[in-house]
Structure formats: structure tokens, C-alpha cells
């Protein structure tokens, strides 16, 4: 028996026949000029959480790379932002993870973010120099671990590949000493942005006890539509 779903490509264009858990909180963005469509995309709540973290990660590491703002000030600012973003992430993903019986993934990432934030603040406020000297490795390692565990839980080859990319990023850091923060931000934010724009592989759909019979029937119809395209 294959651990990964052999019928699922690693990545593909986003599917349009969405299940009820994906339709909940869906946001569409349409930018047009006259009759010309410049940009048209839709984002599920999972996509929205990924985009949220992509923006925050890029801002945090770009600020660390280029801004003269003190580490103390950045520590206070980004601690507040990280805690708020973690809470928002849990709010956005709660229904999807509950339906998919993957609530542990939500708590895993929440725990990883808060745990790494605590270590970072120990480096900044308590003078733990070994933490400050390895902040980029700390956060790339946190993401690598999160992607690996998530990939195993979702049976997703793409998430495991993301884990490897972040692990390779750690090995590359010594060669780019002057640009470690910026490159780290690019790796973390770029990966999150990519995941929000594509359909990634995961285990076969389950029949969730959270959904009503009508919602289960709707999901089955959507599944059949996806199979026919």
C-alpha cells in the first residue's frame, strides 16, 4: 500500500469544485480595467492563513536585514504581531482542520511559532548570544520541522519537499553571512506564497463526522466533479 496518494500530482492548478470546508470563508479577488481582467484569484481560509504568514515573515526578516530599528523594539513589535497572527491563523483554519480531522496540525504550528518566539525573545531580552547568532537557522529549522510533520500527517509530498528546502536553506546560510535575514525571509515567505497559489497533494478525502448528511453529499458531488475534469 502506498503511503502517498498515487492519483494525486504533487502540485497542480487550484481545483474549482471545492468542498464545503474550503468554501467556508472563501475570498475572491478580481482586478479589472474595463473588460480586461488583470488579476482573478480565489483564496480559501487555509490560503489566507498562508498569505498572512508570508507577509509577516517577509516583513520581519526584511526589517531585521535593512532597518536601523533596535532589536529591543523589534522584539516587542514582532512578538505582538506573531501572537496576534497565531491567534488569527487558528481562527481561519479551525473549521477546515476540524472537518479534515487535522486539528493537531493547527496546534502544531501554533506551538512551533510560540516556542520559537520565546527562544528569540530570550536571545533579545536575556542576551542569549547563541540564539541571536542562529536566529535564521532557528526559524528555518522550525519551519522545516513543521513542514515535515505536516507532510507526514497530510501524506503530502509537497510539504515534505518544503521541509527539505528549508533544511537546505540552513546549510546555505554560512555562505551568505551578510544577507542571512533577507534570504531567510525569502525562503519562508516564498514557500508560503507558493503553497497559497497551488493545489497541493494530500491523502484521500475522509467522511467527516463533523458534517451533516447534506454537506457530506455535497462534498461527494464535488469530488465527482473533480474526478471528471
Image (spheres, rainbow, N blue to C red):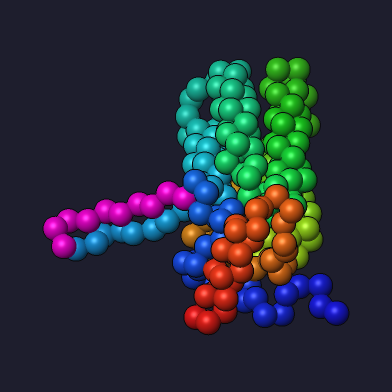
Prevailing secondary structure of the magenta residues: strand
Q: Residue at x 74, y 53 (%)?
A: 209
Locate residue 188, reporting x and y percent: 59, 49
Q: Dividing the picture into quarters, in which one does residue 11 lie?
A: bottom right
In the rendered view of the protein, which quadrant contains the N terminus? bottom right
**Left of 107 or right of it: where is 54?**
left
Locate residue 195, reporting x and y percent: 56, 58
The magenta stretch spans residue 119:
no
The magenta stretch spans residue 29:
yes
Q: Residue at x 62, y 76 (%)?
A: 9
**Left of 47 or right of it: where is 164?**
right
Residue 26 drawn above or below residue 222? above
**Left of 143 or right of it: where is 38?**
left
Query: Is residue 201 visible to the viewer in this orientation of the structure?
Result: yes
Q: Residue at x 74, y 27 (%)?
A: 118
Query: Is residue 142 visible to the viewer in this orientation of the structure?
Result: no
Question: What residue span does the magenta drawing correspond to?
Answer: 26-35
Amino acid at each position: 500500500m502506498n503511503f502517498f496518494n498515487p492519483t494525486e500530482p504533487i502540485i497542480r492548478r487550484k481545483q474549482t469544485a471545492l468542498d464545503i470546508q474550503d468554501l467556508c470563508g472563501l475570498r475572491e479577488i478580481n482586478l479589472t480595467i474595463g473588460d480586461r481582467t488583470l488579476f482573478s484569484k480565489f483564496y480559501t481560509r487555509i490560503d489566507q492563513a498562508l498569505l498572512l504568514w508570508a507577509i509577516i515573515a517577509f516583513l520581519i526578516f526584511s526589517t531585521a536585514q535593512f532597518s536601523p530599528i533596535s532589536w529591543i523594539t523589534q522584539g516587542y513589535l514582532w512578538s505582538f504581531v506573531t501572537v496576534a497572527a497565531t491567534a488569527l491563523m487558528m481562527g481561519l483554519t479551525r473549521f477546515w482542520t476540524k472537518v479534515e480531522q487535522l486539528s493537531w496540525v493547527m496546534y502544531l504550528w501554533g506551538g512551533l511559532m510560540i516556542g520559537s518566539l520565546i527562544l528569540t525573545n530570550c536571545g533579545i531580552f536575556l542576551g542569549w548570544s547563541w540564539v541571536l547568532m542562529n536566529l535564521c537557522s532557528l526559524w528555518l529549522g522550525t519551519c522545516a520541522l513543521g513542514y515535515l510533520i505536516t507532510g507526514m500527517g497530510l501524506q503530502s509530498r509537497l510539504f515534505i519537499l518544503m521541509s527539505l528546502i528549508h533544511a537546505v536553506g540552513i546549510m546555505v546560510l554560512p555562505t551568505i553571512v551578510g544577507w542571512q535575514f533577507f534570504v531567510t525571509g525569502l525562503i519562508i515567505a516564498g514557500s508560503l506564497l507558493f503553497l497559497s497559489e497551488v493545489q497541493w497533494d494530500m491523502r484521500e478525502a475522509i467522511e467527516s463526522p463533523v458534517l451533516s448528511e447534506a454537506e457530506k453529499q455535497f462534498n461527494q458531488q464535488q469530488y465527482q466533479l473533480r474526478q471528471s475534469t
